[in-house]
Image (cartoon, rainbow, N blue to C red):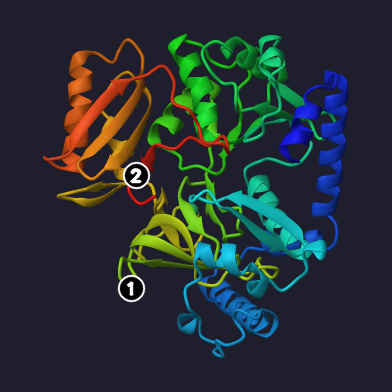
Amino acid sequence: MNMDLWSLYRKLPFWFQDFLITAVNVNQYRIRRKGRYSFYRKYYSRDWSSDKRLWKAESEVRLADFLQFSCSQSMWFSSVGSSSLSFFPLLEKSDLVKNLKRIKTIDEKDAVVSLTGGTTGASMKVLYTVEDTQERFALLDTFRAGHGYELGKKVAWFSGKNLATDRDVKKGRCYRDDLINKIRFFSTFHINERNFNSYWNALERFSPEFIVGFPSSVFDICEIADRKGLKLHNRVRVFFPTAEVVLPQHREVIGRVLGCQLVDQYASSEGAPFILECTSGRLHIHPLSGVFEVVDENFKPALEGELLVTSFTTHGTPLIRYRVGDRIKLAPPEECCECGSTFPLVERIDGRTSDYVLSPENGRVNLGNLSNSTKSVSGIIAFQVIQDFQDEIDVHVMASDLFTDSERAKFIDALRERVGPTMSINLKVVNDIPREKSGKFRIVKNRLST
Ligand SMILES: [Zn+2]
């Protein structure tokens, strides 16, 4: 829905808004679950992960098919003329923005269109075939089913939808309901101290079994509840975070307040393959959804670095060796997981490659490293680092009473250790840190290059 439609929507009576969102949602689920969906549910439910030879062979077949399809159907890849992945050129975000016409294999009218706000501000469009979306949802649904969720069980969603007006939220209506699938969609645009009761009461009354959405939004609610000593009466079973990097303090506070387990996943809206958390709490690459290459600054294979993804569910807009803009760290290949899966293990997901501070002495200090600097510091609710100059960063901190002068000094020391001795650190305690237009929270904003 575009902006005008949303503002019209918000003017309707609540019951009618619920009715509309239910209708749209039921229809969406109907389309996602038609066609090849049940085939892929069965396909992904098979026990691939315990037999390394089996999934490796299957993954190679799927890769060969996908590369051949892309070379014959996409103008962009037609000149590659090789069946080996390493001969394919890297695909940049800017290629998708400027050359979609040559990359895509289908007409927009036959496609499921996905729009994403790129980091540069240019909005990016990707076209999916219907079958690809059915396969993606089948894989996600199989994953969530493995952790207990099936459509129809009570679930609360916290994603980037601006569903409610300030007035609605004050009246306690910070959500809209899909009454048939038992989904409560919460607005993520109004979560703050003032509106806390509205959110907390709505959660208590709904008492969801599962939660899906932005970890920073769910964290914001839980952090206030935690300070007030509140815990949800009916425990949530599982929280499935989406779209953002999960930080250690997210796990700790959300787990404490909601009483739930947090089960992470990685996939981008452009259609990257999946990394999914297993029942033992480790992250595994799903090798039947695509190929992950991790490379260093010179594009040589590495354990830690930037991701190049090749995604088997992107027949509409083939992503081959695509620089998706995220960093991960792989676990050593000989490491095994307790869960019994032999799918490759990921040590951690570090988030966007553009989310780093450039230090005169230490070079790139990435998000994962920076967010660790709050570890032993009390009283930080949220923080954001902004770099506009080479030798200066602004650090905005939302803090509680526990953030005393000595905690403040500890935090600055921890930051100093990472950004080096010559960087000026301007720390400011603020009441609020605004989110991005998409509703996402960004910890690091590097504006040096823009
Ligand atoms: Zn595992």
The residue located at (65%, 26%) in the rendering is 187
Q: Where residue 153 appears, x then y in whole percent?
A: 75, 34
Residue 36 shows in the view: yes
Residue 233 shows in the view: no
Q: Where residue 192 appears, x then y in whole percent?
A: 53, 17
Q: Is residue 141 left or right of residue 406?
A: right
Residue 203 quadrant:
top right
* Image: 422 above or below 204: below
Whether pointer 2 and pointer 1 mark residues with C-beta atoms closer than 8 Å, the reply is no
* Image: 367 above or below 269: above
- Dot 2 or dot 1: first in sequence order is 1
Q: Where residue 420 appears, x then y in whole percent?
A: 15, 42
Q: Residues within 10 Å of mark 1 (few under 14, many from 20)?
A: few
Q: Amino acid at mark 2?
A: Gly
Foreground residue, 145 or 123?
123
Q: Which numbered marker is on residue 368?
A: 2
Q: Amino acid at mark 1?
A: Lys
The residue located at (54%, 89%) in the rendering is 82
Q: Is residue 446 left or right of residue 225?
A: left
Mark 1 highlights which residue?
A: 300
Q: CA distance from mark 2 to mark 1?
A: 22 Å
Q: Where residue 144 appears, x then y in whole percent?
A: 65, 46
Residue 300 quadrant:
bottom left
Q: Which numbered marker is on residue 285?
A: none
